[in-house]
Structures are given as C-alpha cells and as structure tokens.
Image (spheres, coloured by chain):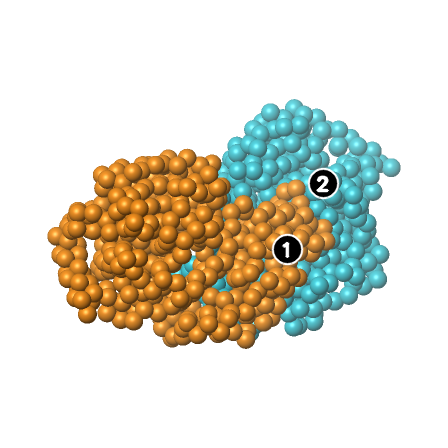
Chain colours: A cyan, B orange
Amino acid sequence: MNTKKNGQENLKKMQKWIADNRKTWLEEYQTFLRFPSISSEPHYKQDVINCAQWLSDYLKEMNFEVELWKTNGHPVVFASNLRAGPDKPTLLIYNHYDVQPVDPIEEWISPPFEPQIRDGQVYARGAQDNKGQCFYVIQALKLLQDTTGSLPINIKLIIEGEEEHGSTALAELLPQKKKELKADYLAIVDLVLRRPHVPALTLGLRGLITLDVVVEGSATDLHSGCNGGIVPNPIHALIRLLGNMRDANGSITVPGFYDDVKDMSKEERSAVSFEFDEDEFHKQTGAFATGGETGFSPIERAWIRPTLEINGINGGYSGTGFKTVIPAKAIAKISCRLVPDQEPEKIKKLLKAYLEKNAPAGVKVKVTPHSGHGKPFRVSPNAALVKAFAKAFEEVFNHSCEFIYEGSTIPITVELSKVCGGETILFGLGLTTDQIHAPNEHFGLDRLEKGMLAVALGLLQLQISKN
Amino acid sequence: MNTKKNGQENLKKMQKWIADNRKTWLEEYQTFLRFPSISSEPHYKQDVINCAQWLSDYLKEMNFEVELWKTNGHPVVFASNLRAGPDKPTLLIYNHYDVQPVDPIEEWISPPFEPQIRDGQVYARGAQDNKGQCFYVIQALKLLQDTTGSLPINIKLIIEGEEEHGSTALAELLPQKKKELKADYLAIVDLVLRRPHVPALTLGLRGLITLDVVVEGSATDLHSGCNGGIVPNPIHALIRLLGNMRDANGSITVPGFYDDVKDMSKEERSAVSFEFDEDEFHKQTGAFATGGETGFSPIERAWIRPTLEINGINGGYSGTGFKTVIPAKAIAKISCRLVPDQEPEKIKKLLKAYLEKNAPAGVKVKVTPHSGHGKPFRVSPNAALVKAFAKAFEEVFNHSCEFIYEGSTIPITVELSKVCGGETILFGLGLTTDQIHAPNEHFGLDRLEKGMLAVALGLLQLQISKN
C-alpha cells in the first residue's frame, strides 16, 4: 500500500515538472527534429554528425559523461551517469537519432524537417521513430534529476546513428565496447503500443535482411516496336523471377527459406494476444488484411511468420504520356522479415543463389545483399525487468499492461543484448498510425509525456526491485 | 537502256547539287533538330508549335502552298505544289516533326537538342525519327526544283506533330480533310533498312495500343516491418497480375488475344526475307534474341506475331540505400504490338477486362487505355508504286531492293491510306542501330544524302510509269 501511495505522489510531482517545463522541452524536442539526419543517404552525412553533436552537448549539460564514438559510418553517442553507485543496478538504454528518407516528399503536408504541431500531434520525420522516443527517455532522466536531485539507479545511454541503415557501424563497434556497455539491464525504446490507452511491452521482434536485384537485357534502351518479340524485356524477366518467389498462397518458394522457423512454445503463445480488429486496421491504413500466407491470422503473419517483400521496383518509363521502350535494365529492392531461428546471413545466401539460378534466359541477374541485418529476438514474459516496467506502465496508463510482439526489426537488439549481458526489455509509445517510414510522420504530445512518466517510474521501480 | 542512261545522268546532277549546297542544308537540318518538339510532354507545347511554324515558313520559301491545320493537339503542316498539272499523278508524302522524350537524359553524350556531328553521324533527338527522314524528303523536292526548274509530279506533304503520342489529333482531323489528302499515291517515310548497303521497302507494320495500370493497396505508404504479412503489397499484386499475362513460352494468356491473328499468305511469305543474324544483333544491341514466343524465329516474332510489353514499372523506393516500405500503389505502362486482323479497340477491351477481373484480393486495379492506337498494315509486293520506288532505290544503292516488314507502328497509316485512296508505300533510311526512342539517337549523313537521291529519283520514276 505504501509503495502504491509513493507511486502516486511521485506521479504527481513528475506531472507538475512536465507542465512547468513544457515550453523548454517542447522547443528542445523541435530543435532535435530539425536535423535531417537521414542515415542511408550520403548527402546528409554532415547533418547526421551535427545531430549527434547536439545530443552530446545536451547530455553534457545534464552532467552525463559523454563520448562520441567514431565508426566506419555515423557516430554513436554514449553517455553515462553512474553516481547512484555500485550497489545500485545499471540500466543501459538504447535509442537512435537517425531517420528514414522522406520520399515521396510531395505528399508531406508540412516540410519533414520543419516540425509543426496540429491537433496535439507533432509532424516531422523522426517525430516518433526514434527521436520522439529518445527524447522522452532523456526528459525522464532530467525530470528525476530536477525533482529528486539524482538518478535512482546507474544509467548508460547508447544512441546510434544508423538504425535505419542496418546498424552496421554499431555492430562492428560492439566487440571493442564490451566494458562500457556492460549493464544489469537493457531497455530498447523503439517500439509501439497496439492501442493508445493500453500499455504494452514487446516480447518479440522479427529480423531483417535487404538486397538489390538488377536485371540487364541490353546495352541501351531499345525500341519496343522494332525489338519487341526479339529481345527479353528486363521488366518481364524481373517480375517473372520475383513473382515466382511467392506461390498463390503467399508462401515463399525459395528452397530452405522456412527450414529454421521454430514453432512458438505454449508459454510464449499464452502470454501474447493475437487479437486484430480488421475494420479498425482498414480505417487507419486504407488497406485490407489480405497479405502474407494463407492459414495464419493477420497478427500471426506479422509477428511469428517470416515475409519477403519487394520494397521498390523500377524500370523503363513511367512519367506522363508514354514511351515505347524496352529498358536496358530493371531493378528491385527486396527485404525479408525473419523469425527465430532463421539466420540472416544464411537467408541472404539462399535468396542470392535462388535468384541467380533462376535468371531467365538472355538476361543478366545481379544480386547485391546489403551488408547490415537484424536477427529475430524474443524476451521471456517472466523476466524481472519486464515485471518492473509493466508495473510502471500500468501506473501511468491506469490500465493492465499487455504483452505483444512486433513485426519490424531493431537490427542491433541481439548483439547489443549479448554485449550488455543483462535482461532485455523492449518498449515504446509509438502507434502504427504514426506514419513512420511514410509521409507525414507524427507523434502525440500526450504520448511524449506518458513516455517521460513511464521511464521515470520504471527506474524507481527497478531501484525498489533490486533492493 | 535509254532510261538507265537518263537515270545515271540524273543521279550525277543530283549528287552535284547535294555537294554544292551541303553547307546550307546541313545548317537547316540542324536548325530543325534544335526544336525540342516532344509531343507527349505538355511542357513542350510551345516548342512543338515553333517547330511547325519553322517548317511552314521553310516550305513557303520553296513556293509550296502551306496550311497549318489546327487540331485538338499539336498542329499539322500541310503543303502542296500541284504545278505539274492534272495529267500528272499526285503523291502524298507523310512525315512527322514531333519526337520522343529524352529520358534518361544523363546517358546522352551530347545534349539531345544541340545536334553534334561525330564520325559522319548527326546526334540529336529526332536526328533520324523522323526529322532526318522528313528533311531528306523536303531536300529531294528542293533539289528537283533547283536542277529541273519544277517538280515532275504533283506533291502534297502532310507532316504531323503527334506521331510519338498516338497520332490522335491527325486521326480526328482526317474526315474533314478528305479533299486535301486525296492522291494517287501515298508514301509514308518513317521506316528502316535492315542493312546499311541494301535498299528496302516495307510491306507490313504492326499495330499498337498502350495503357496504364495502377494497383492501390493502402491510403499511404506503410512500414514493411509492422505491416508485412498483413497487407497485400501493391508491387507483388502488380507483378503477379502482369506476370500471369505471359506463360512460360512467352505466349500471351489473355483470353481472345490471338483470336483474330491471320496466317500470312504464301505470296506474302515468299516476298519477304526472314533472315536474322543473331551475332550481329547482339553486337549492335548487347541483347540476346531470347524474347517473345517460342516456336517462331526472331524476325517472325518481331514482324508477324503480336506482343505484350511492359514499357515502364514503378513502385516503392528505388534510390540509393534502402527504405523498408510497402508503397500505397504501384504502376505499370503496357503496350501491345498487333498484327492483321487484330483490332486495337477490341484488344484494349480484352486487356482491361482481363486485368480488372484478375485483380488480386485486397487491392484496387485501375486500367486506363490511352486514346490513340495504330492498326496493323500490309502492302502488296506487286503494287505499281512499290515497283517504281524499288527501281529508284536500286539505282541509288546499286543493289537489289529487299522487301521487309517492320515490328513497330506508324499509327496513322491505315486511316491515312484510306483517306488518300491511292496505293501506299512505306520506306525510310533508318537503321535499328540509330537509337531512336533511346539516348544518343543519330542518323548518318550518307543516308541523308541517299534519301534525297532516292526520293527524287522515285518521283521521276513515277512520272515515267504514269506516262
């Protein structure tokens, strides 16, 4: 009872801090969003660096020890405050400050790097993914320092700059930073809720691999009248090749693709809710739930089944009017989401071999797997860290916490968890309607505030549970 | 013998005129090429008009009666010189002054509308198709006027501005211009030779229809991690839909597509050479002859068999890096080349019905046939007009004339031939290596000169054959 009362008092104090400091944190959040830190486009390299530098300066102001780790790619921000002392636990928190590209730019209502607040939502690339989620973590720490004078446990922050580009640079760095990244707990804060009013912790992530396919038929574009019927059209060759990778039931036909897919245990299945409201989904996205493999429910298809998606295709002329051309080449970008125990590098090899082996007659097929990948990941619902944060979330939302999986990928999860050595938790206050990776990305200010509260209470809860 | 001697004397006189006036016609040719008269892109509307105006002024200078016919699209240049008198035959000659778009612009060695001469070839968009061919026709007339004081027969020129955009405007105009376009003969000068040293007349053209296909899956782009497996990916839906339109043998599976394809008569087949040098073709294009339907030779597939080609496809992200997106929509541009007796409007309906009927579950398929079309066309090898021009070509090339077909389309041929009411001939001095409809289009100055000679001699031959 005492704990509950303490919790409520804490909550009130925190809410007051948030209200009193609203103008400051809102301005700072928007400053963070103004950096066009697109990690996958070389053109934005300096903007990515500037964003890391701003974060570094911000955390130094908060009395954190800050290091900017150089990598082969974009820098990693590492910050720590270990003043709680060796008898207190240490929590490592992961976020990223890089963002997705902004195409199609013409569909943005306000420019992606000029944040605009409309109806309590902040619109900007990265508003949610992951600058918004990174920002409420930092504010939670600031709030605790301001209201209690110190942090209840030891904190390490790792904020990387290449999550949207495969986390390659950080993955390469991990072996050298084992000491720095050692902790009792790891929190990866880049996830979503399923419903705005229901708190959720994520117990599973899918893995990811990506690759480019180029089909070349001729040295130059050819006239489709003179040559149509003589030459193989690279677009036809590409769509035949890619089309054959899925059968009529949506199953992936690449030999060996499903070999290592492991069934869920009873314990795993009972902890998770596979509910799915098709009408609500259609209302939110305009899409019907007709994708993926037959024989599985929509949420099973998104959480516990692997996929193969063409994320981009391009060949020939697709502007206004018409051009009767047979293009010299056609290209596609493919990704697979993976589930335990599929190995990313093994799946890359399977796909490359399949595509090269099945190259249609008369064309060249070049397959280039991208170097980054993400492994699939699962968390036990019984971990102490899961229980502590579930409690914190329930207090903030005044609603029981649900356990979910996530169809997407945080590439670094598996390796980072290994290097940290402690229990791992995955959460976040995104919603699937936030349009991350799409035009008009946004994040609700209500969720930004709840994020500050939940993280702060989670830290207090961890302090208690350790004692 | 006398005719042959006359022919040789005429040829010498003509060659002298060409040499003496080289500087002038070469400058004028390049002026013609500098107009970016791209008919399919609204942005170039005024340039198309300027080009028509320049042609009109040029022909007036040559004492032609000139009319600029207004249409719903780009203007048609109509010019006549009937001073040979009513006892002489009248030849209507068709060309077009519009050109194809220039994408991909970055692959041009010199800018497409700044003609450059390299190794005897003039590089520019339209250098061959069709400004080059139009220009040698006009110079042949000028040459005859300059060297003999008059034209041997009555001449009408029709030079349209929308051939690369389906000839819709001219097709609409034809019923109102029956009187003006009436003639004994029609020459359509927009064709190719198969080998640079062998003259050729074209006895067959394929028809053409074009259409756009749009597949929509959601209201906005979606994240392929969160939604992959739940939603149908419009790219997958599009490639499945289009992929199923051809079977493994390259045959088109759309019901009814081949119903009206007529076998060639023995007479037609014996007049035409279906020879094809696969090695030479590969050397020229970098492509292998593995396209189209099995069971037919490469040239049969290009000349007497219909095709279905995807000329453009686009969906999702295909820039540098990677974007894990499921796009809201994907599009394709499709064309069919048709052979006798396929009816373009009937084939459009078949395709639209097929695509709409086979729309994959959960996506919307929108099919928009373009309004223009070209009907397939055949000429008898025994026509008097064919014989006259075969003779003229043999004199210029000093080589026997071959009869060929053409895989591409001149949309207006059938209707124009009907309105003209006379025998029709199809020829031209293009080569398949001229890169028409592709970057670095070019035309040989040797062929430009041969074109002037062949047209001039053809006119003299027609004067004789009528008498």
**Disc 2 sits on a residue from what chain?**
A
The quadrant in which residue A342 appears is bottom right
Q: Quadrant of the C terminus of chain B?
A: bottom left
Name the residue that disc number 1 marks. Answer: B350
**Disc 1 sits on a residue from what chain?**
B
Q: Position of residue B118 (x, y in %)?
A: 23, 57
Per the model, the C-alpha gap separating discs 2 and 1 is 35 Å
Nearer-the-camera pick, A342 or B8:
B8
Badge 1 marks a residue whose secondary structure is helix
Q: Is residue B461 above or below residue A149?
A: below
Q: Quadrant of the N terminus of chain B?
A: bottom left
Q: Position of residue A111 (x, y in %)?
A: 53, 34
Give the number of the disc on residue A284. 2
- Please give the name of the residue rendered at 75% of the width and 32% of the height, measured from the top-left corner: A11
The outermost residue toward the right is A1
- Please give the name of the residue rendered at 27% of the width and 67% of the height, measured from the top-left corner: B394
